[in-house]
Image (cartoon, coloured by chain):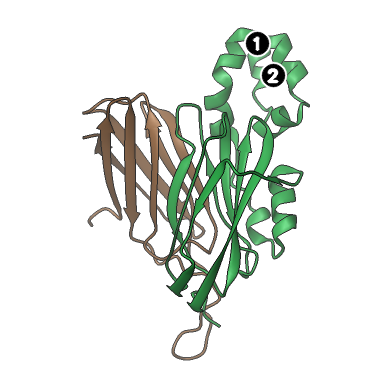
Amino acid sequence: MTTLDGGLPVTRRLVLRGAGSVVLASLGVVLVQATPALAAANDKYPEEAFKQKDGKEAVKLLYGRTAEPSDKIKLDAPEIAENGAVVPISVSTSLADVTTIALVVPENPNVLAAYYRIPTGTMPNVANRLKMAKTSNVIAIVESGGKLFSATREVKVTVGGCGG
Amino acid sequence: MASSIRVRAIANGETTEVQTLIQHPMDSGFIKDDKGEFIPAHFIKELTFEHNGRPVFIADWGTAVSKDPYVKFAFKGANKGDDLKVSWVDNKGESDTATFKIQ
C-alpha cells in the first residue's frame, strides 16, 4: 500500500486532464475505486476563481478550458426577477458522470456564484438562490465525463441585489 | 444557541432529497451601511454534506449566494434513520456543524 500514499496528492483536476491517469492506471483497481471519495475530499475551495470579474476567465481558472453549449442541461431561472437579492435558480441535466456544476453570472461584481461538487451517487441536480446585481445571463457549467457543457438563460432584474 | 442549519432530508426509495436553509448574512462586501461605509464581506465559503463519513455534496460559494442560503440536492444510497452531517465554514473562519436524521 505504500504506492497508494504516493498517489494521494493527485488532485481530481489533474486526473481529469490526464496527467494523473498514468499514475492511476499503474496503481490498479484499489485506488481507482477509492478515487471518487478521495478526489472530492482533496479538492480545495477555488479561491482565485471566486475573485474573477470575467466569466470566461473564471471558467478557465476552474477547469482550464471552455464549455460548449448543450441542450441536455435544464437551467430554470425566472424570466424577470423583481428582487435581485433572491433569484431562485436550479440546474438539472441528463448528462452522465457529472462531477461538478458551476453557476456564473457575468454581470455580477464577482462572476462565479457557486461551484457544486457532485460525488458518485449524487444526482446532477441542484437548486439554490443567488444575488444578481442587474439584468444578466446566468450560465450553468456542467462537467460531465471530463468534458464541459453549458446552458445560458437571461434573467431581467428590476431591483439589483448587490447594492451600490 | 440554536443551530444555524436547518435540514429536511427525506428518503424516497433509493433517492434521498435534501433541502437546507442556513442562517447567515452572506454579506457581499459591495453594500454600504447607513453611514455610507461598505459592510465587509462575510459569506459561507464551503458547505459539506456527509453520509456515513462520505461526502455526498459539497457547495463552494462566493458572495453572490443570497442571504440565509437555501440549497437542494439529492443523492442515492441512504436509508431512513441514517445520519446526515452538515457543516459550513465562512470567510471569517466561523463555522457550524449539525447532524440530522434522514426521514
Disc ID at residue A6: 2
Among the chains, which one is brown? Answer: B
Label 2 is found on which chain of the structure? Answer: A
Residue A72 coordinates in the image, percent (x, y): 57, 40
Q: Residue furthest front?
A: A71
Residue type for callout 1 = Thr
Q: Quadrant of the C terminus of chain A?
A: bottom right
Crowding at dot 2, Cα within 10 Å, few <14 / some 14-19 / many 20+, comes out as: few
**Quadrant of the rendered structure where residue A11 is?**
top right
Q: Which residue in the protein does label 1 denote? A: A2
Amino acid marked by disc 2: Gly
Chain A image colour: green
Tell me whether circle 1 and circle 2 mark residues in contact (CB < 8 Å).
yes
Q: Is residue B74 shown above or below B96?
A: above
Task: Indicate the secondary structure of the residue bearing disc 2.
Answer: helix
Please tell me which residue lies in front, B43 or B68: B68
Q: Residues within 10 Å of mark 1 (few under 14, many from 20)?
A: few
Q: Is residue A61 left or right of residue A114?
A: right
Measuring from the top left, give residue A118's x and y in whole percent: 51, 36
| Residue A71 picture quarter | top right
Which subunit holds the residue at mark 1?
A: A
Q: Position of residue B8 (x, y in %)?
A: 26, 44
